[in-house]
Structure formats: structure tokens, C-alpha cells
Image: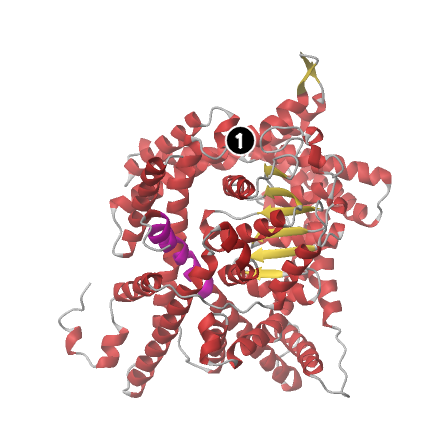
Amino acid sequence: MMNTPESTHLPLADRLLTIDRRFIYLFVMLAAVIPFMFKVELDVEVTPEVMSVYSFIDKLKPGTPILLAADYDPQTQAENGPQAEALLRHMFKNNLRVIIMTLSQDGAAMAEMLSTSISAEYNKIRGEDYVYLGYKPYFGIIILSIGQNFRISYPADFYDTPLDEIPMMKNIHNYSDLACVIQIGGGNVTHAWLTNAHERYKVPLAIAVTAVSGPQYYATLQSGQIFGLIGGLKGAAEYETLLRDEYRRLGIIARAIQGMNVQNFVHILIILLTLVGNAAFFVKKRQGGR
Amino acid sequence: MSPIELTIWQTIGAFFTIAIFSFLYKDNPLYKIAESIVVGVAAGYFTVLLFWTSLKPKFWDQIITHRDGVLVIDKWWYIIPGILGLLMYFHFSSKFAWISRYPLCLYIGIGSGIAIPLSLQTFVLRQVEATMLPVSLYPLEAQSINNLLIVLMVVAALIYFFFSMEHKGVVGKTATFGIWVIMVGFGASFGYTVMARVSLLIGRIQFLLVDWLHWVK
Amino acid sequence: MKRRIPMLIVSITGILMTIQYFIPHPWSEAMYNNALDWLVIIGIFAMPLGIYSMIRIQVLKIQRRSRGWGYAVISLISLFAMLGLGYTQECLESGTFFMKIFEFIYIPIQATMFSLLAFYIASAAYRAFRARNILATIVLAGAIIVMLGRIPIGEAISPFLPDLAAWIMTVPNMAAQRAIMIGLGLGAASTAMKIVLGIERSYMGME
């Protein structure tokens, strides 16, 4: 953990450049923990790309069917989880009929927990107010098959109830019966929703993706292929800001907004680390080092 | 779930969280045990999931169904894709591995056939179409300047990727501008990647401090 | 039999599917529906390949007493424990013991493993993110502006920062991503065409 005895005799720039990486880990951990000690109510600025998702959902009439594809897994739960919760709360608050599905294998459990817990907050009945279809492998094929008929890939829902026996699914056959698709995830599955659902069947699509995937979808946002984009925890915090009164009414922690304070601290730390690293690098370079 | 049961389960979760964090100090058996558990649990969960929510409703229940309390053979022809799927397992045989090519080729053929028009439509035609933006010089507004910049930047970045022409003269200068644009894009991607990674850490700290220890309300 | 027929399957199905996109005739629709239906089933049967492969690797490790073979035993015990607990469909519903293992063991481990990346990216930024030349400086500046502009404190530092970050995302970043996307689209379509025409055969282990 400590520097070697030789390194303590080195010039400052060298010592900074050879610092044990575990010190950096310690700084990051502290920057992530300390902000939790202070309760700060942050104002999160809502970007147009998030606002358009909110407005679209908000304008739909009660009872309108909507598809929520929760294609995320434990790895990205910290980002996609708050996005999914906020979106589903908004949909249930507006009494929309929601079809929930997933194309991620671990997402099957995540989406099951999501639909069970959020539907309980709003006393929604499975089969009437929402349906959970579950997971099927090979996402590209599944997305295409839904364009023809949900029943090709999903003869039954996640709980083994045949789709034809579910009241909510009575007049829902394919994308043309839905107001839109909201996909939560990122990566190849999002690409497949773009090509196989939006382009092939012209269904309106909005996406809530991890921050890593976020930048690449600005091109599809500008082209109108997606009508909205929720990027990472920041995007989730924006959506929670729009639903702030609802979170207060339910007495639930807005986790993404809570996380923004930590995001502040760690970003500043990483920027400082980058600047210090660069300063040490250039000092050493001027002194004739590598 | 009772509060005590929840606390016990959360404590187990916290134990494994800390076990994984211990890797930051150095590799250790606790980390490796957690890693091994994840491999087994993932495979076990997936097998169970696939059996109950895919194989049973999509294959088995389609072939053998209950009608008026009697078992009836319905869509018998589903056995054919089932057999085709099983042929994939010949992949592990050195002598008969070629048999696994049949279902694989069916997949690749259909997948490729679908991908040709859709890839061109989504990622080429629609993108080119969206770049054809109106630029009005009078009145000159911020949106017009941005539209002009978008057109110039997309063209420059594309020229950078165009290697059939030597990057010299006007082409060279445009390509240099193109690589600058791409680098700004990479910078934005890096910034977003930092955001994403930090968010993942926030999720775990929230689990430890908010859900488990209730230190923060 | 070993090569020509598989290649013929690829070509025929590929051409049919491409044509189907442009000619939505009831016949081609019916063929398309059946193809999707069959592919879902083939996919379901093919998926356990990965699981079989994982078991094989773990068993080989134990048989050969390779380094760390004890961990392979733990993996197999976890696997069979989950298979044992998943004996009914109801086990997949929230609140069951099977799901508690997923929620309180699997999720924390997986999520924490990925959260380690936050530490690594901080370390990488400190050690390797250098303004060595003009291009690296552009990346560095872009990243810092976006990092500051996309967090609430950015607004406090300068009200100009969020706007600048938004401009970077919607103009230069968008343009760069679009150029990459066009390249990706052309690449994907041409590879698919090469496969259908039998020029690209590496998926069959052939040059």
C-alpha cells in the first residue's frame, strides 16, 4: 500500500506518477461515500431528449397500450433500474396498459421484480392493467416476430397464462396496436429495436440506455428514429425530477437524484486526478524524463 | 418477507458486495469464491428460465396440449425445428461437427437476408437523409449555424474514413478536420463512460448505506 | 453435403428474406411468419449449448486437478443447487427462495464486479489520460466539458457549461457518431451480402 523507501526520495512529479493505485481507489471510495452524509436537494436540469419521452407518455389517454422492453441486467441495474422504475411509475400513474418484456436473460428476474413491486404501489392487476411476458432468446428474431404477432414468440406470458386468455391482450396483436415502445438497456439489443421494430414496422420508439451507450444514439435522435433518449443515471434523475411530486406522494427515495450528489463529487475527483496526472507528466517531461 | 428475513438476506448481499470490493486491495480467495458462485448461479438460473418460460410454452405445450381434459398431439411439425436445434450439439463432435452447420446456416441465411435492407435503411439511408438539413443565411439563427456545422462535420468525418483516396491537399485538410470531430465525439463518449462507471458504484454504495445499514434516508 | 448444402441454405434463405422485405405478398408473409416461428424454436434448443460448454470446462478442470479446481466445484454446486430449487415454474416469481438467491447473491456480486470499473477508470484517467498531442487534447477537453456539464454542479460553476456540453452532444458528437454509424451500416450490409452470395464463409470455419 505504501510507497517504496526509494520512491520517497524521488522528486514530487515522479512520486505522483508512481503512486500506488490503491490510494486512487481509496479516494474514489471516499468521494462516493462522503456525499451520502449530507442531505442535499439538487436541482437537476431536464434535457429536451428526456422531456420528449415524458411528454409523449403524459399525453396518452388512459388505457392506451404501451410496450416496455426492460432489457437490462444486474451489471447495469444502477443506471437502468431507476430509469425503469420512473418510467413504469409514470405509466401506471397515467393508467396506461403496459406490456413488459425482456430480451436479456438475467433481465427476466429483474423485470419480474420491477413489475411486481411497482404494480403493487398502484394496485394494478396483472392481466388487466399490465402483462409481463418474460424472456425469449435471440432478440433480433423476437423483435421481428412481435411485429407479426406477439403470439409467435410468446404463446403464454411469464406465468404460463396463454396470451389469448389474458383480457388485456384481447385486441393486441402486434406493434400497430401499441402507442409506442420504450426500450431500456443499451448495446446490440437497442440497435435491434431500432432496425427490427422501428424501421421494419414503423413503431414509435424511445430508449433509456446506459451512459456508455448514450452518445451514439444522438444520431438516431436527430434523425427522428427515436422520439426520446434517457441516458444513464443522469437521465433517470431528470425523469425523477419530472415525477418529483409522485415520488413524494409515494414516500419513495428518488435514487437517481440522490446519486447525483455523489456523481458531482466523483466527477470532480476524476477531473482533478486527470489534471494532477497531466501536470506531473509535463513537469517530468520538462525535467528530461519520458 | 419479514423485516428480519430481509435484513438477513441483505446482510448476505452486503457480504458478497464487500467480498468483491476486496479485490481492489488484492486478489483473494473470497473474491474467487464469489466469482465462482456467480458462474454457477447464472447458468442454473438460465437453464431453469429457459425450460419453464421458453421450452415448455413454445415447444412442449404446442405439440402436446390438453383438450377437454385429454392429451392431444397438436402442432407435431414443431418437432422439425426442435430436431434442427438439437443438431447444433454436433458442434462438440470432431467427426460430425459439419451437421451443426445446417441449423446454423438457416440462422445465418435468414439473419443476413433480413439485415441487408434493414441495416442500409437504418444506418445509412436514414442517417444521410437526416444530414440534409436546411441552412438559411437570412435570418441567420443558431439552428442554421448548427445545421451547417452538422453537414460539414459529418462529411469531414466520413472523408476521414474514406481510405481509397490519399489524404492530401483539400482531402487531407478535410480529413484532419474530420478526425478532430471524431475526437470530440470520443471525448464525449469518455465523459459518458465515466458517468456510467460512477453510477454503477453509486448503486452499490446505495445498497450498503441506504438499503442495508439505513444510514441514509 | 458438408459444405455446399449449408452454403445453399444460406443463399436461398438469405435471398428469400431480402425479397420478402420488398414484396409483402400474403405468401411471402406466411413464409416469413413460419421462418420466425421456427427460428424461435431452434434458438431455444440451441441456447443450452453455452451451459453445456460451461459444465464441460468446469468438469475438465476438476478431472485434471487444474489450478483453482476447487472453485470449479463451487460453480458446479451453485449450478445444481439452482437447478434443484427451480423445479417448478412458480420458483421464478418474486419472493421464492430461488429468486432470493438471485436477488441477494447474484445481483450484488454481478453489480459490484461491474462497479469496480469506476475505480479502474479513475486510475486510468490519472495514469494514461494525457494531453500528449492535439488530438489527445481535444479528447481530454471534450471529456472534461461533458463530465462537468452533465452534473448538477456544472451549472453552479458556470451556467454556460451545461449548454456547451449539450452542444457537444448534439453537434460534433452527433456528427461523429453518424459517420461511424454510416460506416457500421455499410459494413453490416456488405458482410451480410457477402455471406448470402457465398463469398464470406468464415462462419463455417472456412477461409
Determine if the magenta segment contains residue A166: no
For the C terminus of chain A, the image quarter is: bottom left
Q: Position of residue B24 (x, y in %)?
A: 29, 56
Task: Please identify the residue farthest to the left as the structure is shown.
Answer: A5
Query: Which residue is drawn at the image coordinates 30% and 64% (left, top)?
Result: A30
Q: Is residue A105 left or right of residue A29?
A: right
Span colored in magenta:
B194-211
Q: Please, which chain is the residue tagged with disc 1 on?
A: B
For disc 1, the neighbor class at 10 Å (few under 14, some 14 to 19, many from 20) is few
Would residue A185 be found to the left or right of residue B36 on screen?
right
**Along the line of sight, the residue nearer the viewer: C117 or B214:** B214
Residue sticking out furthest to the right:
C25
Q: Is residue A181 left or right of residue A137?
A: right
| Residue found 71% across the figure and 39% down from its top | C9
The answer to which of A86 and B175 lies nearer the viewer is: A86
Indicate whether A210 appears above or below B131.
above
Q: Is A57 positioned to the left or the right of C32 in the image?
A: left
**Which kind of residue does numbered mark 1 sit on?**
Lys
Q: Is residue B189 above or below residue C37?
A: below
The residue lying furthest to the top in this view is: B70
Q: Is residue B215 above or below residue B150?
A: above
Would you name the residue on which mark 1 appears?
Answer: B95
